[in-house]
Image (spheres, helix red, strand yellow):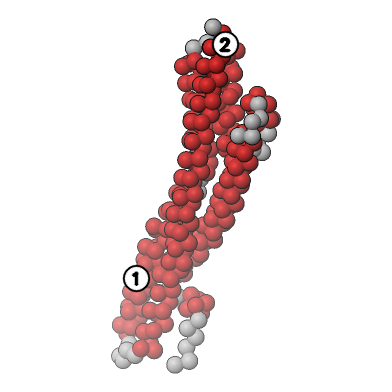
Amino acid sequence: MNQDLSIVQLMLDASWVVQAVVALLVVVSVISWAAIFRKVFAIRRVKTHNEDFEREFWSGTNLNELYTAAAQGARHGGPMERIFASGMREYQKLRERRITDSGALLDGARRAMRASFQRELDALESNLSFLGTVGSVAPYVGLFGTVWGIMHAFTGLASLVQVTLAAVAPGIAEALVATAIGLFAAIPAVVAYNRFTHDIDRVANAMETFMEEFSNILQRNLGSSSASGH
């Protein structure tokens, strides 16, 4: 009864299928944790940039000055700043083409902002599908390792005359380790996926609200320009 039932020893004694399943789950777990940490810092950085830009936008800074700064620092800015720059760039291009129809000007700016918004959202949602896949598939991969391990353990008992708990325990224990590691990989991925989805939805709502508010500002400017022209 002095058998070593430590996880390391159980894995060393396990069949190659169980070892392969556990190795795969460990690798997937490491990759998912790396993706989780990257996404945490990315979302935090996006929130900070968006809040800073929104604060500056509503501070009364001239739109042309704000656009110049946003265009120059597009790589280092946040999604909201790049969305603003896209809309303002298209708006100014249409004005330079002597387009005076306010509806065409607003539609052009909105389309440019919507395209930029979609690009920013796609970047924010990168790696989310991987975490969702890990969360849904990892337990089944671990379960496959467990079923295989138990089947292998009982196959080995067929040649024994007397079956005792001591003979069965190591095989079942090594098989259950696969399920445990599958859950260890899946649970953080599921929690992170749900949390990131919620955070990204909030960021997306904030950016959509900003696009509407900026469109209203452009519409008011066009209205005042038309009034002064008359």
Looking at the figure, which quarter contains the C terminus? top right
Q: Residues within 10 Å of mark 1 (few under 14, many from 20)?
A: some
Closer to us: 61 or 1: 61
Is residue 74 in view from this perspective?
Answer: no
Do tag 2 and tag 1 residues touch (Cβ < 8 Å)? no
Q: Position of residue 125 (x, y in %)?
A: 49, 45
Q: Residue at x 33, y 83 (%)?
A: 157
Q: Residue at x 54, y 25 (%)?
A: 217
At mark 2, the secondary structure is: helix
Q: Amino acid at mark 1?
A: Val
Q: Amino acid at mark 2?
A: Ser
In which image quadrant can residue 17 be found?
bottom left
Return the residue at label 1. Answer: 147
Q: Residue at x 44, y 63 (%)?
A: 187
Between disc 2 and disc 1, whose residue precedes? 1
Q: Position of residue 189 (x, y in %)?
A: 47, 58
Return the residue at label 2. Answer: 228
**Residue 56 left/right relative to 143:** right
Q: Residue at x 50, y 81 (%)?
A: 6
**Residue 53 left/right relative to 119:** right
Spot the residue most to the top.
230
Compute the Cα span from label 2 to label 1. 79 Å
